[in-house]
Amino acid sequence: MKVWVDPEKCRGHALCLTYAEDAFEFIDLEDRSVVIEGAVDSVAPDVFRAAANECPERAIIIEED
Amino acid sequence: MAADAKHVIDFDHHGPMLRDHNTEQLKELMYNDAGCPMGWSTAHNGHWAIWGYDALYDAVQDAETFSSTHLPPECPKGVPGALYPDPLIPIDIDGQEQQDYRKVVLNWFNPGHARSLEPRIQQICDDLIDDFIESGEADLAYQLFTALPAIVTLEMLGWESHRWREWVGWVHSFIHDATHDPELAMQNTMLMYGSINNEIARRRDELGDDLFSDMMRTPVAGKVLDDDELRNFATLVLLGGMDTTSGVTGNSVLLIDQDDELRRQIIDNIDQMPKIIEEFLRYAGPGGGLYRRVTKDVEFHGEQMHEGEKVLMMFWAANRDPKAFPDPEKIDIFRTQNRHMAFGLGPHRCLGSHHARRMFATLMTGIFTRIPDFEVDWDGVERFEDCGSVYAVRHLPVTFTPGPRLTPA
Ligand code: HEM
Ligand code: SF4
């Protein structure tokens, strides 16, 4: 599975942090989130899917294998 | 204008119907026979209102067609047009300039900063509840829901927080009196502007370590902000900070008082508060008179829109669109795929959303742990007259079993 946050769509709602705090981190001065390096391997795929479902901007992109 | 609109309605968002029959009115808009996600209202000299989730999503992401700017004096923003000629910063500005203004304060409005404030928010909440918990009665809207966000906002700005009642009075008048009593709103706005000017003067020689000092020292496009910009920026932080969080908390408490099962669910799942509040933001959000201006003739979701027309962005209505939220009238604290728009979407996403979420969660946890058996005295409940700008509760009297203070008086 590949996961990333589309920087054009992300508007920094930070709901991904509420639903998957081990998977995403926030870049404060850019007002947006990114996937933590290596998190795709350490965090369960369902956690990413749940976060993607709550992102109101639809900025979390998941490519299933 | 818009003589060719297909779906024409007579809908006054500042009127008493929306305030007193909120759910019915929002449903009437949503469930129209033609299935239109938007319509042309003849109220206030005519304007569009968008309530469908998908249409609103498209509009808010297209800031070139749906501009946030004023064009005074011909076309001041808002319905009816704003009383105050100056654009508020950053909400009445588009594009790179708006993003540059946001950058000035991002140090203060990011999720990490909101988290770092948590102990202080908790302390304020504990103290405010201490003030009334032994008496068995309180006006939750004023003594708690209004007080907490006001104190937090003033502390961030570095302004005297013990004067919160004065600031709140001006802010409430600015927001809620503008349509019904513009003269009063203008008087209070002038008092507020005077006090903001005093804060500018106080810092002229020595800046401090607070949000307002950062606004004064940080250049935008190579220039520090002048007094007008500072005032228009600070005003928006006050408006955003003081009224909305209180609104959603009051609206939520009123709903929960009418539903014992919901109250029990919340108490049983109190450690899930960060997720529970998302459902109340969706269903009980303070709405808000948020507007855009159409910049060119455009065909949009089945309607022909024309340059210069005003648009009311009904985020709170979209939050009940059955196409986006199954069984939208049910308050389901376990709801998933809750992509609500309570804080807007796109480039103007609420800057205070991280703080608002923390404050709202702290307030809810405080009430449902310390006075869980509260009962609303419905005869004393008073809403702000004009819900077209913010749908909120002015007075919310409750009684409850008295409890102990956390800190001795
Ligand atoms: C539950 C509470 C709140 C709600 C529902 C809310 C709602 C909103 C919405 C819908 C917008 C978008 C406006 C638009 O698209 O035109 C917005 C913008 C804004 N809000 Fe909030 N807000 C809340 C709390 C706060 C707080 C606590 C603050 C500050 C302390 C704040 C400051 C702002 C600012 C500065 C903007 C303008 C952002 C921009 O234009 O770039 N808000 N708010
Ligand atoms: S929830 Fe979506 S928009 Fe918000 S920070 Fe996360 S990825 Fe970005």
Image (cartoon, coloured by chain):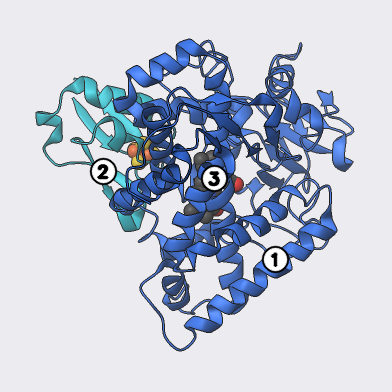
Chain colours: A cyan, B blue
Between the C-alphas of marks 1 and 2, the distance is 36 Å
Q: Nearer the viewer, mark 3 or mark 1?
A: 3
Give the amino acid type for the residue marked by disc 1 in the picture: Asp
Label 1's element?
loop
Type of residue at label 2? Val
Disc 3 to disc 1, C-alpha distance: 32 Å
In the image, taking residue B225 as reference, residue A7 lies left or right, namely: left
Label 3: which secondary element: helix
- Label 3 vs label 2: CA separation? 39 Å
Q: Is residue B35 above or below residue B222?
A: above
- In which image quadrant can residue B59 be found? top right
The chain holding disc 1 is B
Q: Name the residue under label 2.
A: A34
Q: In this view, does B251 lie to the left or right of B120?
A: right
Residue, disc 3? B143
Q: Which mark is residue B86?
A: 1
